[in-house]
Amino acid sequence: MSRLLFALVVYLLVAVMVVLPPVMVFAAALSHGLRVAMATLAEPDALSAIRLTMIVTGISVAINTVFGTMAAWTLAHFRFPGRNLLVVLIELPLSVSPVVGGLVWLLVFGTQGWWGAALERWGHPVLFAPPGIVLATVFVTFPYVTRTLMPMLAHNGREAEEAAVMLGANLWQVLWHVTLPGARLALLSGVLLTTARAMGEFGAVSVVSGHIPGLTETMPLHIETLYNGYQTVAAFTMAALLALMAMGVVMARNLTERRHGRTENTA
Amino acid sequence: MSVQLEQITRRNPRNGRPIVDNVSLAVASGSFTALVGPSGAGKTSLLRIIAGLDPHQAGHVSIDGTRVDTLDARARNIGFVFQHYALFAHMSVAANIGFGLSVRPRGQRPRRDVIARRVEDLLDLMQLSGLGGRYPHELSGGQRQRVALARTLATGPRVLLLDEPFGALDPLVRRQIRGWLRSLHERLGLTTILVTHDRQEAAELADTVVLMRHGRIVQAGTPQALEDTPADPFTMAFTGDLVRLGGRVENHVFTPDLPDILPVTAPIAAGPAELLVRPVDIALRPGQGQATAVLRQARGPLGLYDVRLGTDTLQVETLMPPDRPRILPHCALDVTAGRLARDNAWASVETPPFPGPPSIHPTGERIHAQHS
């Protein structure tokens, strides 16, 4: 009886807190019909925001996949002074507010900062331009690949890598043929998590973007601009699109996790 | 290929304590050597040092007389079978076995069909025919074990290192694979070093058994030598069953604390001492004491007797008299085959020059033979 009660409470909570908001978003987006909603997406600024989000996400995910994998591999294989500190630093973006992350870049690349003025004169500004948005996104999404990959590499991979070395494989062959394929599902899971997080990032990007419609507005920023401009349907349509994209990525991740759980620890 | 170890020392990188402590060992080409000892003795560490997987802080590893201390593990051409096989879970059995050949540098890499043929041969050799397309998680423990071995042998190493290769197998499969490994060793002319904590496994497989403890070699020799002439009490306890008898030495005669055990002469100074003897080496002397031996179990010509000595009961395994009596009254125990230990002293003992008939009298009668 009490079990049923608990289940009921959980369902109610999930319905109100998790299911209701996206439903409301979709309802608001479609309040004037599907055609009106789709038309708002065809606006040049909207298209530009979608394009920028995709580009920024793509670059950030690529950077974090490469460096996150290297970090995870290094941390899983070597014991060196300061290793624990490094782990804490890598996890820092999880605990620090994204706005702080954005402000850091502002200090480094802003006109008052270290290199900002020089870059400005050189004609390649970082702040209030796509490179800054990429930097901010990379910072916020840095921990995910490392965190999902590291435990996997530390526990499962060690003996297999040594076996490969004894069979004559060099470092790259070990990495390419043994380590990464062995951890591919964990890696994919981390990449998808990074993707979902990168697409939705608002705080850090907001600080460095400058909110220039058509130029430096990602989807989340554009949603805010539209909403503040009382363009409710457009704002909610963009929000619905972003939510759909995120849900797709999360669903893909769940699928890999389920396969992951099935084939783990089998050899 | 021979393997020589000269004064190898490896320290724990965390606390600097030696894991392997000044170990020297010569492994002859074509021999089968077993490293045995309790867990934490440094067996696996020594194996990993030979392989080049772990560094050593002092000493030299030589293969065929050439020092390989600075040679990369991958360049030593040594085969290593890991305790948990370490198969590549995402590769088929055939890809696992062919891995070593397919990662060779371009000039030395065999053609694809040559690799495939070599894999087929190895599958046959390992009695795994037809399993090349399977994945490791679809195989039984014994099959995985053989895939690991096939993968190691594919590149044609001359030295084979095995780290507790049978630990995860059930006893029946274990026995099978053991015999088969030994014949494989002979057929391929390998030099094999095996790590195990199972003394029987070591004795059954190896020509030379190396007993390790606290990172050092306690004794190395044939299995028989270790059992017959153990270098110290630890070796004796490790290589077989043991009975420990406390007692005292006075005037070079050891008298056990328990009654009805015949005293023995001992070449050590007076004081307390312990006598170690294998149950199978204890002889029953009917008519020389007050103990009663009760047959508990007959094992062929041997009988397992419970002997009541004061408040203690000893188990003795000995040759039964022809009429196989269930009860032997008025016995004493002869422990001449034992060894005496005190601190660093370690000595064999002898029958003292006073009464004691040579063995069980067939009729179990009381007799008083005089020995001089």
Image: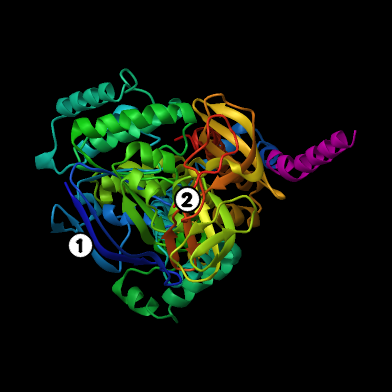
B19 left or right, relative to B257: left
Q: Main SS of the magenta segment?
A: helix
Regarding residue B86, the answer to whether it shows in the image is: no
Q: Amino acid at mark 1?
A: Thr
Q: Amino acid at mark 2?
A: Thr
Identify which residue, B274 or B37, lies in the foreground: B274
Mark sitting on residue B336: 2
Q: CA distance from mark 2 to mark 1?
A: 52 Å
Q: Which residues are magenta?
A: A1-24
- Determine the image quadrant of residue B152: top left
- Determine the image quadrant of residue B286: top right
Disc tally is 2
Q: Give the vertical position of B297 relative to B88 (above or below).
A: above
Identify which residue is drawn at 43% across, 70% down: B17
Q: Earlier in the sequence, mark 2 or mark 1?
A: 1
Identify which residue, B243 or B261, lies in the foreground: B261
Identify which residue is drawn at 39% across, 76% down: A116
Q: Which residue is mark 1?
A: B70
